[in-house]
Image: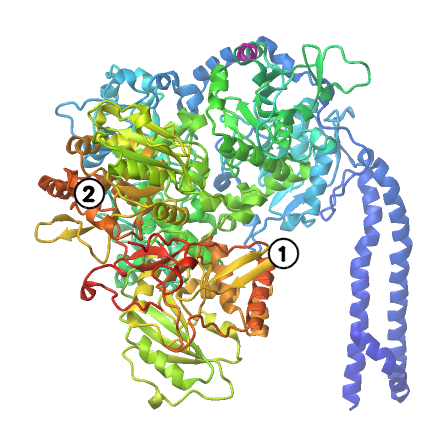
């Protein structure tokens, strides 16, 4: 009892003391602060805890704006001379577009790329061959050096590791002897590897002069911003075109995979690149953070082996690299000998969010890609914080990081062609600065290679950004009717079609593309409609002219029609309202399907009525005007000529194009029954559907197109969109789209 | 505090009973404590009051009274800035540490006045008004710390905003005098007017070791990408002049040039452009004959006609911002403030905050050499884009240019983003003006991905005690080929679910989850038992859906995995008479919601509903035992910006005899309640996210004249 009381009093006294301390603790320094601050004024002392305080007394502005004479000082130096002087001063490591690039070469013909002819006897790696053929197949290519703005060597500069069998000798002399070399001006040099053991420098071993570098594993130190391009390291098996899709198929919730963070790779016992990897075992917990290294590589690893090697090697062999890659949320991408590694692209494709540990690596295409949206940029110095960092990343963020890895992989990295074209487009954006892509175009679907700024620099002119910007497409469409047969009577289908389409409340304008051999009929022979009808004579009367991006199209939406299409105004109205929900797809009536013919080992085309479809033919379909532009400029001349020569398959090609951009199937909407007959080739007239070759041609087209795209972009759908009350047992008067149900 | 109170109340009762020795001891202790308290109290009030009085006078004179530091002639000079410096080489991250807020701590040195040995100050202006504003703003921000040992970034109070007012060598010496200078590591200097005559360097000439430089007017040759920060040149007009925001749209002039110090070569070129294009261009210059007392900075003239600056900027669509001797021009700030689209002609200039701002959306950059083509280039820009740029320009000014505070905090945020890149602000956060942030969507599930069919879906049946009906539903659903698992959420705490043996035998796993409370939100909980992406939410009385209909619904969901794909469709309408939203379930031609009594959706939305539902909606729904489905529709539409998909024509769900529309009930109160929900949710979301569409999804061959047995989904009921 006594003790208890004593404790109580002791405790209370203690509390009092603490209280005192508290008061004192706060108060004593405070009360000292006054004098000390006064001291500050007299002594040149500084107080470690002093707070910066605002001074409310009137102060002078930092610049005397009223009489700023600074600018007149410079009056005597001509800005033009100053610009010219730059190009003399800023060369070599300080090269920039302003000082080392001749913009005037690009003025006349736009941004065209020339590839030097290949010399006989010059060995060239497969990768470099792929690079050159990608350029030659692109719309930027010119075979005429006089028209070119950018030059690409036919000398293989990819591997500049002297120990490599691919190493090209005497490059210096070979380059100097090129008569268009011009000190390297307007040249771009592709490189994947430079330097060799033990220091792996970034020197290419020859004088690149004023040329730009498109180089893998480039360091920020050597990277000349807005001049060089950092490209990813890719293997010699990287496909030239097409390219594999990302591995992401599921979005499981919660988004965590079996492992949180993985790494499996070499550990270097000597030489550069060893620091980070040597420390990885500190973070390894053999549960969800699995970081494995092996010493077993190179000839004489046993000689240098350290105390950890045997243990590490044993642990290393227990796990499978692929299994970990596919089953981990994050993948560690530490530097190797060089800054970049294959692992980076592998992780990207596997939707394993890369955790970068490679200080000073200028990330691939850093000029245009916002890597924070697809990767975690770590700091080698903070390796031990990495696990807590990745664990702190929120579930939503993981999902979006993961999706972004897939988008970037498919948009810029999955083939040599994409890597090369991205490089060239980045340079083109610098050359024509005022028509270049904004950050959003590069970093959101469908990516910069499908978003051509020459069409428009306004995001709202493309079908992809409506939701991002919170805007809607223009609420009208333009009908484009493709006419191939002469006008003979007022009752022929095209006349009816024009009237019906023009009657739609959403129709802004009708354009007739006159692709008939007969001369244009007189103006009065066309039906009178409430909207303007413009007749355009098809360019050299080829079928592709129906997809030209006519300037006279005032709307975002285009309703593409064949001359023999039978539609009602209601159907047109309904299709257009559906399109407004899916502005990046083809929305229309005649549906077709593709299939893999395993007997013949090729793609097949079917017009049979099936439970699914993958194409909606452009004989009656609505899509965004931008696809006209893409069709005309993005597709290669070879495919368009093939289509024009056959006068067939243009609709299939359009479907390939749109699906390769959107990665989605088209949308079929309800149709009236009689439409089927027309489209099935039952009509009596000599339509192209009656031609027996027609069908065979379309099979051929499918396979030709698939091989150019490098993959089959078409996607199947099992549904069709009907009006909400379609065929419902309710009074027809309640229905908005009645006509669709009437026969 | 509490303990001492206890003591004083009980003290008197305790003391008399103690031994004298103890008593004396305690009394002494007590008095010591008391004395101490009084003493501190005295200290607290007495000197403090004097100090606060001193503070008041101090504020008036403080700048001059800043402690004087004499710089010895021989004091060291820092090295010139190292051009190869990057965050990973010249910045010490260990100082910043790992912290859950991912925010750097910034220390500001107290003001000192540096003089050379003769007593001449190192700067002609000393602390400028702007630098004072800047430092004050930082010290008021969350970045600030007054604990120098915990700081990650140090800001000297030596004002180097304008190089012209500095003695370079002495300023450099002053920097090294800073107690934590340490080769400039983690120090940040703000400079807006770099260089001096005749050649005007584009970065501050003061040697500064490894210090980071936030500079206005960097060129590509002096800017260390990813290390320095390019900042705007602050315009004093930002504070002095209030320009109301104007609606984007065409302006009276097309191009306006208002700078006064334009090189004559460029002025000649502009004159030539004016000759070609006439009225569309307005070329202003200094006024030569202004009466005394008029601020010349606020007037511009053209052929004797006087215009108010910067107001005139609002009358033009595009405004030229040409380089002068320096690349960074304060005019850029004025132009943005006016909502005029800047046309920037300054080769090699690093635009302000270019690390995070997408200038292509707010400006036009033209090489100086192409000045003569300016008109044609600008004419080729679509009108809608010009309007967006005008809006964007104004937004950039408001957010990042308008005050020294904005400039300072933006700079710190950029550095912060580099140190904690995984927590960095996104492109959208930096670049989207509030109006776009409000109306645009940003779903993490944005990839056009059609998930494979194989994993199937998990049916989640919410039930209370309708066992018979529940068993019928289970039996019906179990016939659907893609069903992977059935989860029964047993929401009745008073009654146990039937014994295992009584449940229908089905071919897929059946799990029963018992809930702790009878809440509607239990149906949307992201149960671990749901292992598939696709969830079919279904009420325990929906017995009419056929297996074909359900399987088809799943197939449609695969094509639209980020939407609600459901059977009963509903609509919201604006009631003009009442001035509010109304719920509609009659036979309509439009759909904006699908009820979750039978709907497929992604499990992600369960997660969102449970953890990310805005405001008090979740509790509100649980309290009212209604509208959880409407809330889900709001949530999904809000994050995706997309309408739900109604599948198949079915209208009857509970029994063949029921009326075609059978929600919970059809009576008037129900409709009123549901309307109330819509209005409540719309106000919480701050917008109406629901999208109205006029279509529904049917199988490709639905109602087509085609043999039924060849159709994938023949059994699609008409009602």
Where is the N terminus of chain A found, in terms of image quarters?
Answer: bottom right
Q: CA distance from mark 1 to mark 2?
A: 55 Å
Q: Is residue B273 magenta?
A: yes
Which of the numbered marks, if any, corresponds to residue B579? 1
B272 vs B117, left or right, is left
Front tag of 1 and 2: 1
Residue A474 rendering spot, x and y as whole percentages: 45, 40
Q: Which residues are magenta?
A: B269-275
A145 vs B520, left or right, is left
The residue identified by callout 2 is A706
User: Which quarter of the figure has residue B333?
Assistant: top right
Residue B96 rendering spot, x and y as whole percentages: 57, 49
**Residue B2 in view (yes/no):** yes
Residue A358 rendering spot, x and y as whole percentages: 40, 45
Question: How many residues crowd around disc 1 within 10 Å: few (fewer than 14), some, or many (20 or more)?
Answer: few
Query: Judging from the image, what secondary structure is the residue with disc 2 in?
Result: helix
Question: How many residues crowd around disc 2 within 10 Å: few (fewer than 14), some, or many (20 or more)?
Answer: some
**Residue A361 in view (yes/no):** no
Q: Front-most of B491 and A287?
A: B491
């Amino acid at each position: 009892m006594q003790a208890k009381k004593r404790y109580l009093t002791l405790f209370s006294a203690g509390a009092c003391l603490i209280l005192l301390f508290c008061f004192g603790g706060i108060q004593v320094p405070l009360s000292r602060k006054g004098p000390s601050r006064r001291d500050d004024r007299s002594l040149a002392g500084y107080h470690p805890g002093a707070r910066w305080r605002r001074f409310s007394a009137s102060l002078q502005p930092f610049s005397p704006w009223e009489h700023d004479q600074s600018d007149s000082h410079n009056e005597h130096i001509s800005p033009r001379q100053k610009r010219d002087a730059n190009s003399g001063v800023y060369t070599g490591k300080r090269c920039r577009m302003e000082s080392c690039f001749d913009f005037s070469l690009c003025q006349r013909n736009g941004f065209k790329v020339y590839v030097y002819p290949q010399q006989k006897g010059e060995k060239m790696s497969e990768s470099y061959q792929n690079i050159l053929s990608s350029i030659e197949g692109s719309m930027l290519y010119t075979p005429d050096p006089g028209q070119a703005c950018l030059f690409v060597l036919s000398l293989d500069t990819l591997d500049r590791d002297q120990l490599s069998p691919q190493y090209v000798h005497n490059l210096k002399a070979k380059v100097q002897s090129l008569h268009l070399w011009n000190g390297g001006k307007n040249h771009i040099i592709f490189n994947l590897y430079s330097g060799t053991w033990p220091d792996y420098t970034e020197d290419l071993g020859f004088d690149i002069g004023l040329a730009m570098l498109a180089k893998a594993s480039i360091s920020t130190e050597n990277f000349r911003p807005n001049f060089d391009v950092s490209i990813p390291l890719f293997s010699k098996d990287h496909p030239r075109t097409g390219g594999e899709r990302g591995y992401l198929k599921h979005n499981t919730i919660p988004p965590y995979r079996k492992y949180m963070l993985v790494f499996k790779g070499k550990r270097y016992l000597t030489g550069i690149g060893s620091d980070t990897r040597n420390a990885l075992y500190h973070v390894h917990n053999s549960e969800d953070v699995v970081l494995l290294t092996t010493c077993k590589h190179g000839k004489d690893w046993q000689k240098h082996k350290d105390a950890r090697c045997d243990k590490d090697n044993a642990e290393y062999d227990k796990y499978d690299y692929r299994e970990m890659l596919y089953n981990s949320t994050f993948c560690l991408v530490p530097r190797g000998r060089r800054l970049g590694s294959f692992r980076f692209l592998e992780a990207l494709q596997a939707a394993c969010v890369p955790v970068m540990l490679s200080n000073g690596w200028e990330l691939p295409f850093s000029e245009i890609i916002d890597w924070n949206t697809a990767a975690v940029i770590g700091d080698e110095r903070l390796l031990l914080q990495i696990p807590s960092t990745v664990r702190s990343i929120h579930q939503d963020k993981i999902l979006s990081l993961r999706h972004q890895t897939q988008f970037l992989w498919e948009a810029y990295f999955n083939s040599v062609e994409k890597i090369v074209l991205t490089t060239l487009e980045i340079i083109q954006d610098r050359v024509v600065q005022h028509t270049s892509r904004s950050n959003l175009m590069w970093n959101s679907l469908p990516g910069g290679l499908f978003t051509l700024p020459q069409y428009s620099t306004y995001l709202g002119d493309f079908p992809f950004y409506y939701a991002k910007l919170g805007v809607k497409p223009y609420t009208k469409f333009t009908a484009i009717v493709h006419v191939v047969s002469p006008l003979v009577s007022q009752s022929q289908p095209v006349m009816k079609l024009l009237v019906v389409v023009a009657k739609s409340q959403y129709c802004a304008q009708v354009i007739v593309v006159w692709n008939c051999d007969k001369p244009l009929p007189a103006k009065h022979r066309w039906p009178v409609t409430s909207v303007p009808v413009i007749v355009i004579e098809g360019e050299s009367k080829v079928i592709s002219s129906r997809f030209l991006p006519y300037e006279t199209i005032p709307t975002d939406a285009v309703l593409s029609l064949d001359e023999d299409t039978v539609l009602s105004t209601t159907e047109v109205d309904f299709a257009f309202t559906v399109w407004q929900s899916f502005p990046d797809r083809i929305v229309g009536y005649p549906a077709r399907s593709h299939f893999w013919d395993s007997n013949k080992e090729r793609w097949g085309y079917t017009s049979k009525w099936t439970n699914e479809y993958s194409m909606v033919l452009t004989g009656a379909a609505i899509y965004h005007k931008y696809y006209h532009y893409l069709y005309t400029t993005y597709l290669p001349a070879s495919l368009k000529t093939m289509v024009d020569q056959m006068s067939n398959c243009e609709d299939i090609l359009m479907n390939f194009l749109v699906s390769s951009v959107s990665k989605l199937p088209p949308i079929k909407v309800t149709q009236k029954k009689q439409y089927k007959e027309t489209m099935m080739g039952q009509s009596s007239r000599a339509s192209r559907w009656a031609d027996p070759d027609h069908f065979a041609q379309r099979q051929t087209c499918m396979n030709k197109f698939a091989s150019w795209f490098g993959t089959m972009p078409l996607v199947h759908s099992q549904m069709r969109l009907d009006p909400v009350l379609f065929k419902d047992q309710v009074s027809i008067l309640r229905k908005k789209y009645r006509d669709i149900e009437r026969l | 505090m509490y303990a001492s109170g206890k003591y004083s109340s009980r003290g008197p009762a305790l003391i008399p009973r103690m031994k004298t020795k103890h008593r004396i001891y305690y009394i002494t202790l007590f008095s010591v404590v008391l004395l101490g308290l009084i003493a501190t109290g005295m200290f607290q009030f007495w000197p403090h009051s004097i100090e606060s009085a001193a503070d008041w006078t101090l504020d008036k004179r403080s700048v001059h009274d800043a402690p004087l530091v004499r710089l010895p002639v021989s004091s060291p000079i820092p090295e010139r800035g190292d051009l190869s410096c990057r965050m990973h080489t010249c910045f010490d991250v260990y100082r910043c540490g790992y912290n859950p807020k991912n925010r750097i701590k910034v220390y500001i040195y107290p003001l000192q006045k540096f003089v050379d040995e003769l007593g001449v100050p190192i700067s002609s202006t000393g602390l400028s008004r702007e630098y004072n504003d800047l430092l004050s703003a930082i010290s008021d921000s969350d970045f600030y710390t007054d604990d120098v040992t915990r700081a990650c970034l140090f800001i000297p109070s030596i004002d180097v905003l304008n190089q012209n007012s500095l003695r370079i060598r002495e300023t450099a010496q002053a920097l090294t005098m800073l107690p934590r200078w340490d080769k400039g590591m983690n120090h940040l200097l703000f400079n807006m007017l770099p260089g001096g005559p005749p050649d005007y360097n584009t970065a501050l000439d003061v040697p500064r070791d490894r210090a980071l430089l936030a500079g206005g007017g960097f060129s590509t040759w002096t800017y260390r990408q990813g290390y320095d920060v390019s900042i705007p040149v602050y315009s004093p007009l930002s504070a002095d002049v209030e320009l109301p925001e104007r609606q984007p749209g065409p302006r009276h002039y097309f191009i306006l040039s208002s700078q006064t110090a334009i090189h004559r070569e460029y002025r000649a070129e502009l004159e030539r452009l004016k000759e070609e294009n006439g009225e569309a261009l307005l070329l202003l210059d200094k006024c030569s004959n202004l009466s005394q007392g008029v601020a010349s900075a606020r007037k511009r003239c053209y052929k004797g006609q006087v215009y108010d600056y910067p107001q005139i900027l609002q009358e033009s669509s595009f405004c030229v911002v040409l380089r002068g001797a320096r690349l960074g021009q304060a005019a850029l700030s004025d132009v943005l403030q006016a909502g005029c689209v800047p046309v920037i002609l300054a080769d090699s200039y690093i635009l302000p905050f270019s690390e995070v701002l997408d200038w292509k959306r707010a400006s036009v950059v033209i090489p100086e050499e192409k000045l003569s083509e300016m008109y044609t280039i600008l004419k080729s820009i679509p009108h809608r884009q010009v309007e967006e740029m005008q809006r964007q320009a104004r937004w950039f000014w408001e957010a990042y240019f308008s005050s020294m505070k904005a400039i300072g905090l933006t700079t710190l945020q950029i550095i912060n983003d580099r140190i904690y890149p995984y927590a960095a602000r996104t492109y959208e956060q930096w670049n989207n003006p509030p109006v776009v942030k409000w109306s645009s969507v940003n779903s993490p599930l944005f990839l056009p991905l059609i998930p494979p069919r194989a994993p199937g879906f998990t049916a989640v049946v919410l039930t209370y005690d309708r066992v018979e009906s529940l068993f019928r539903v289970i039996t019906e659903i179990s016939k659907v080929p893609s069903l992977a698992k059935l989860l029964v959420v047993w929401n009745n705490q008073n009654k146990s679910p039937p014994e295992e043996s009584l449940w229908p035998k089905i071919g897929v796993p059946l799990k029963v989850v018992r809930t702790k409370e009878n809440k509607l939100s239990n149906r949307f909980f992201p149960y671990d038992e749901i292992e598939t992406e696709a969830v079919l939410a279904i009420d325990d009385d929906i017995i009419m859906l056929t297996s074909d209909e359900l399987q088809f619904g799943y197939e449609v969901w695969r094509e639209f995995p980020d939407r609600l794909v459901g059977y009963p469709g509903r609509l919201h309408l604006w009631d003009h008479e009442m001035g509010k939203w109304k719920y509609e379930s009659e036979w309509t031609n439009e759909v904006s919601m699908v009820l979750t009594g039978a709907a497929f959706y992604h499990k992600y939305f369960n997660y969102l509903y449970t953890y990310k539902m805005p405001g008090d909606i979740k509790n509100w729904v649980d309290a009212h035992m209604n509208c959880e489905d409407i809330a889900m529709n709001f949530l999904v539409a809000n994050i995706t910006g997309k309408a739900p998909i109604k599948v198949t024509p079915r209208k009857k769900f509970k029994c063949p005899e029921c009326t075609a529309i059978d929600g919970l009930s059809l009576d008037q109160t129900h409709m009123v309640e549901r309307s109330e929900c819509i209005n409540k949710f719309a106000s919480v979301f701050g917008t109406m996210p629901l999208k109205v569409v006029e279509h529904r999804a049917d199988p490709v061959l639905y109602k087509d004249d085609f043999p039924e047995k060849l159709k994938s989904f023949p059994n699609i009921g008409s009602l």
